[in-house]
Image: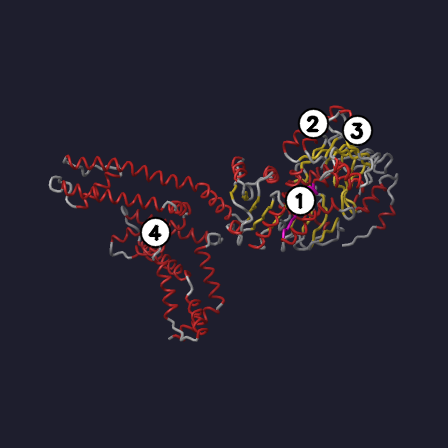
Amino acid sequence: MPSKKILLFGYGHHGKYIAKGLLEDGYVLKVAEQNETFYQNALEDGFKESVLIDMSKDEELVALDPESYDKLVCVMDDEHYNVFITLSLTSLFPDLYIVAISDSIHTTGKLKLAGAKKVIDLYEVSANRIHNILKRPITTQLMKDFIMSKEGISFMEMEIPEGSFLNGRKLEEVNFSSYDVLLVGMVDMELGRGFEFVTAGHEHQLDSGDIIVCMGEMEKLRIFKKIIGRKEPDRGDQDKKEHTS
Amino acid sequence: MNDTILSIARFLHSSRRYRKTKSAIRDILNNPNNEKKKYFDLTIIFLIVTSVFILVYEVKHPVPVWLDYYDIYFVSVVFAIEYLLRLWVHNDLSEAVLSEYYDSKFLDKPFKIARPLRKVLLEKFRYMLTPSAIIDLLAIFPAYRPIRVLRIFVLFRVLKLLRYARSINQFVEVLRNKQFELYTLLFLLAFIVITAGIAIYVLEEKVNPNINSLFDALYWSLVTISTVGFGDISPVTPEGRSISMIIIISGIAMISFATSVIVSAFSERLNEVKEMRTIERINKSESFLVICGYGQMTKMFLRQGDPAKNGYIILEKDRERVEEARKDGFDVIHEDASRTEVLKRFNTEYAKITLLCLTASDVENIYITLTAKSISKKIQVIARASHQNMVRKFEYAGANHILLPHEVVNNMIHIAITQPTMYKALHAVLTGKESAQIYEIHMNAYGSLVEKTVEDLAFREFKLLFLGIHRKGEFFFNPPKETRLEAHDVLLVIGRKISLDHFRERNRGVG
């Protein structure tokens, strides 16, 4: 990924954990807080670049230079501020990519109106989880492991780079399982339909710039990601493959 | 004599089969949650209905002999058996005898069989005097043909239906609360009817050709006070008419009093009756959800799913929230879920219950979890916890699944930032909003797929993406083609619903 700069609003209940996770994944973070205690926490946790600002003042928001960041994340403990910041930021800079947290249906609607690209509803996500526990207990447990674990079986999305051997191939021609990964779905830039599962039954041609989502052991996924960057598939990898069952 | 009875009691008490049979019969007769009771009830109701039908039909038409025999012998015999069984399971003679024996041995007293015998028989006799037992007994009698009047006893069979009609029981239950008022009313009514009846008898017996006895007078008095007024007997003297006027007015007062008593009894307990109904209804289903707390999470949960499909019930102890849930159209009960009695009202023995502890307080959720698990280990508990360090406590309490809303959402945000495409895929898979979802295919023990290999299944043809096998608690991701399936395996696939249905259609014995 080209740049990984994130501006995080809020270092409370959620911000703290998200910041930690993002840091582990190698992102560059800047924390903005208006609460003195949370700000101190952020400093103590090693986010030296943290700033204490008054969110209600536009000039202080502008001073943060939001446009230089990849993504902005609004996870203040007070949902009113999340809506307010989202609105202020989009009114100042319409093209920002803002991810916001919401803790009620009404707030979700407001955040979307305010211009957040992605709104994650605390209760929606949790309620979903309960439905899944009831309907598909095994899947839920596995998915939880997929998401939580850094190693083991997981998902990974990868962009097909320029000059990859996958470029121009039909989906059926590529035997993904010989690399010990499963293709779950992809975003075909040509068709512009957004994410589609492989099982949807459409024919796709892989091109550079397309994003594929694969599933497999983290190690294998990493290897596969390297392989798709090459001009020719490395046959050697396939011979080494051994199944354990 | 003593010894014989004692040894019989001992034998019965130690016989496992005897005790099992007895408790099974007791369960079928008296436990409304027993699955088989439904069939038993239906049989009895069928017998009653046919019997009454025969009675009515017989008035005008000749009845075939076999129907007569059916009515006289079969129905009555079944009822007699039922009556005896009820009497039998009402209490336990052998146990009473034995406990008396041990007590007397302990106290070094001579053992006398008479005492426990008397106690148990007295108890049985008391049962025989309860209204429902009397009705049961009378319902047997229509079999005795020679006395024609006994035929009307068939109507007692109708009364027998009471045992099987919940609503009437509830009606009686509600009225029982107003016992005092109703008795007062009855007493007052009897007083006025008798006084007025005697008065009219004394005043008009000689002048009125229609009043020939005190019974006529009382009959007139009741007909008048109830404002029915058939008119077959009417007063002819001014004195008699004055009495009529007085009892007509008191009659109106009395009727309105009775109405108000009954109405207030119902309005006071309407919610309770409704709640009882809801619980009874839900207890009939094989599996259902008990949701504790009506907050944001519960609302969201109910919005997302189709709650009507599998039964659910909400327990909420806050009055205002109960009202809110009612307004939103959900089945809710105003109860504190942490109380043992509340959870005990559910059919924990026969139904598969899943308890969702979704209140905002950890303390409450843990308490509810413990309460549920102490009632029955079979209750599945999904609990909401606010923090990671609560998880251990919930695990100790016995929760089957622990939900950490904050952690879930933190993860989602993390993924939304780091892997936006995958977030979409995950979101779609988890919410089932898009065409594809993850499905679980369960292998039945003797299904057609057992022993087949992964390759045989040809998931590709069905446009399903095969993820792996979940076997004995372990997940095998993307297993090699030669892997053979075993019974009770769970296969995970991604795909559209129609693909899955197609697959299930082709392969019998998968769930």
Mark 4 Cα shell of 10 Å, populated few (<14), some (14-19), many (≥20) = many
Q: Give coordinates of residue B502: x percent, y percent.
A: 64, 43
Badge 3 element: helix
Q: Quadrant of the N terminus of chain B?
A: bottom left
Badge 1 element: loop
Badge 4 element: helix
Is A135 in front, or is B7? B7
Q: What distance separates the C-alpha of mark 2 from that of mark 1?
A: 29 Å
Q: Which residues are magenta?
A: B398-408
Is B315 in front, or is A45? A45
Residue B234: which quarter of the image?
Answer: top left
Work out which residue is located at the far front of the displayed protein and give it: A36
Q: Residue at x 65, y 38 (%)?
A: A124
Q: Is residue B123 left or right of residue B361?
A: left
Q: Is residue B273 left or right of residue B321?
A: left
Q: What distance separates the C-alpha of mark 4 from that of mark 1?
A: 58 Å
Residue A114 — which label?
2
